[in-house]
Structure formats: structure tokens, C-alpha cells
Image: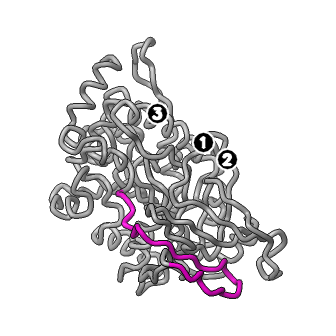
Amino acid sequence: RSRSQNISFFFRVRFIQTQGTSTIASIMGNKQSSKPSGETVTTPPPEQTPEAAPENNTVLPNPSTIGSYLFPFIVTSIDVVKTGPVEHSRYGEGAQYIEFDGKIKADPKDDDVAFLLKVKEKTVHTDGNVTFEGIMVSQEEFVKRLVSEGKKVLACIHGFQTEPDSWMEDCQQIQEHDAFQSSNYIVLPVIWPSVGKVSGVFDLLTKYDQEQAIALQAGTAFASIADVGLKTDLSIMCHSMGNRVLFSFVDSNAEDVEGRFENVFMVAADVWEEVFNTRVIEDSWWQNPFNYNNHWKDTGLKVCKMVKDTGKVHILSYPNDLALTGSSVENYNRRRLGRYGKAGQANRGRIHKDCADRLVGVDYSNDGDLIKKADPLFLHSYQSMPKAVEYYASVMGKLSE
């Protein structure tokens, strides 16, 4: 299929045809942030003495989480702005107060990783954008503090077109669910740069390609927290294109990834459904040399090996996922794992022998109403719906039984 045909097909897909370009921004990623607009509230940086708010009509009390900590730990490769050194030695040498924009766009050169503590909202602007603040520390200090909590960690990696504030909102829904509140868990948002909202179908196609490239780069940055799994119980949840961040991380670290994670949750995975197949892992089937594409090769096998002996790779899928329908067109017309799950290939006897017992299929075919409630437009962003969160908690909870 030619690219012009792809564009025509993409335009006919129902979620574009019926919703228009104003809602395309959440395709392949997360839903829009629901933070309030039309008000501005400012709070002091962490660990500093509060100051009175300016007396003007633009500053209003806000019943949201302004001024309170959202997450004790965040890892990100987006740009953060240093606002001054932290005077307290307990945060380690070089600690800095920082700020970042909740809707910051990607810089292709972003490859530095920031380790953040005590992240909270600072300002909700009149346009609805949120400025966050926190404390940036060294990787060593970050890992030391995370491990000292003595809790199970769920690192959460977002997908396409997802801005920091909306991903933090999703992660907060997971953290505040009863299944996590009553247990010994920490939700750790992992935020990689987004190229920003799209303005139309052609912009969507261009930015989708750009974000695929950024996802590969972000995988290298994710390696910075992988060692945490050697010191505490670390599981990861990847949504949509966040699974490519995962695969990129695994691909770029060769054998060093074995036995790092307790469990991996691949939710609505925007990767080829055959990544765990023998013929792909061994690169053993004929392809047209003029259209050859087997980017991941044995990466699927490495993903299976990166979980510990007691862990599994859990594939959460929904066959009517509209966003992944469009993704397959942009990716050599190859079906996506997030639609067909483990069964799509296991039933054909194609799963690699070393992956067969490591993969767990979680099919939401009979949960269409729950999926629609979570994401009524695209049936794709269900990673924080209660049933999925309860599944994460039940699997992670087995580690202590």
C-alpha cells in the first residue's frame, strides 16, 4: 500500500472520520488532561516557606491538588528548568529546585535524565496549562531513597501524544485506587518527550513518525532506572507506544537486562503482534528484499528474559482498539499486539519456545463497556481503568504471598 493510500485509509478510520481533528491529539496515547482552566494559583517551591498569594482577581482558591505532593518520585527525559540550589544537605550534593511545563514539547536532542522528588503542582494557568515543581537529585540519591521505602514499585511509561500532566493524572488514578492504597506500592511515572498536539491528519502522520523515533531514543534513557530492579521489587507498565520505549531499552542493553523486573504489563501495545514469534526472533522467514523489515529481531526474546524467574510478561489487549487499527496501516500493515494479544499468535503455534511460558494473555474482549467508559473515543487508553489497576495489584501482590 502506498503512502497516499495509507493517508486515505487513515482518514477513513472511524475515530478520525467522526471526531475531527480536535480530538486526534489523544490518538495512540492518553486522554486529555482534566485540569481546570480559567484560574491561576501559585504555591512556593518544596521545602521553602509559603508566601502569601498576590492580592488580585486572577488568583482563586483551587480545590485540586495544588500545593500538595502528587508523586514522591518521577523519572523524566523532558527538559526541566533549574530555579535554585537546595540548601538542605539531606538531598545530597548538587540537589536543585526545578520546574517543568505540563505540556512541554519534545526536543529531539533530549537525552538527559532528571530524577525528581516531591513533585507537585505550582501553578494552574488561565489557559489550563500546569507548571509543576520539585527537587532534582542525583541518580544515586534517587535510587537510595526509592529502595529505602521498602515498597513494590510500578514504573509507568506512557504512549504517543501524551503530555506530562495527563500522564501524571493517569498515574495518580492508579496510585489512588483502593487496590494500591491498601497495599505496599509506589507508582513511578516515567515521562519521555512528546512532540505535542496534532492539528490534522497529515500532521498526525508526520508527528507519529517523529514520535516513533523519539520512543527509540527514550528507551536508552529508561535504562537509568533498570538497576532499581536489582535492589527492590520493580514492575513496569507500558501503554501504547511506551512499549517501544521498553523494546528500545531492551534492544540497546543486550544481555544486561536479564532478571531485572518482577513483572511487565504491556497495555494496548503498539508493537507488531509477532515480536515474540520464533520466525521473527530467529529472523528465519523470507521477506521481499525491497520491503524487508525486522527491526526488533530477537528483542522479544530478551523481553521475556528480563523478568525474574517468578515474573511474567502480561499482554493486556482489546480487539476493537481503534487507535491501533490506524497504527497497523502506518507500520507495514502489520497487526498490533495490543489488539490481538498473546492468543493471536499462540493459537497458530508461532510463539518462541522460551517465551511461551513467560507470556500471559489478558483479553478484554468481553469488557467493551469498561473500555468505552475509560476511553469512549478510541477504546485505547484503558491503562488506568479500575479493572486493569486491580489486575496490576493482584499480580504484584502475589510476590509477598
Q: Say which residue appears at 35% left-offset and 83% top-offset.
A: 178
- Amino acid tagged 1: Gln
Q: Which mark is residue 111?
A: 2
| Image quarter (top left, top right, bottom left or bottom right) of the C terminus | bottom left
Query: Where, by quadrant of the figure, is residue 114 drawn?
Result: bottom right
Q: Secondary structure at mark 1?
A: helix
Q: Secondary structure at mark 3?
A: helix
| Image quarter (top left, top right, bottom left or bottom right) of the N terminus | top left
- Amino acid tagged 3: Asp
Q: Say which residue appears at 83% left-offset and 81% top-offset.
A: 89
x%, y% of residue 322?
24, 44
Badge nearest the viewer, 1 or 3:
3
The outermost residue toward the front is 56
Disc 1 to disc 2: CB gap under 8 Å: yes
- Amino acid tagged 2: Asp
Q: Secondary structure at mark 2?
A: loop
The residue that disc 3 covers is 209
User: Mark 3 or mark 2, which has the lower sequence index?
Assistant: 2
| Residue 41 horizontal side relative to residue 100, left or right | left
Sort mark 3 into few (<14), some (14-19) or many (20+) by Cα contacts within 10 Å: few
The residue that disc 1 covers is 217
Whether residue 45 appears in magenta in the rendering, the answer is: yes
Range of residues picked out in magenta: 31-56
192 over 122 or under it: above or below:
above
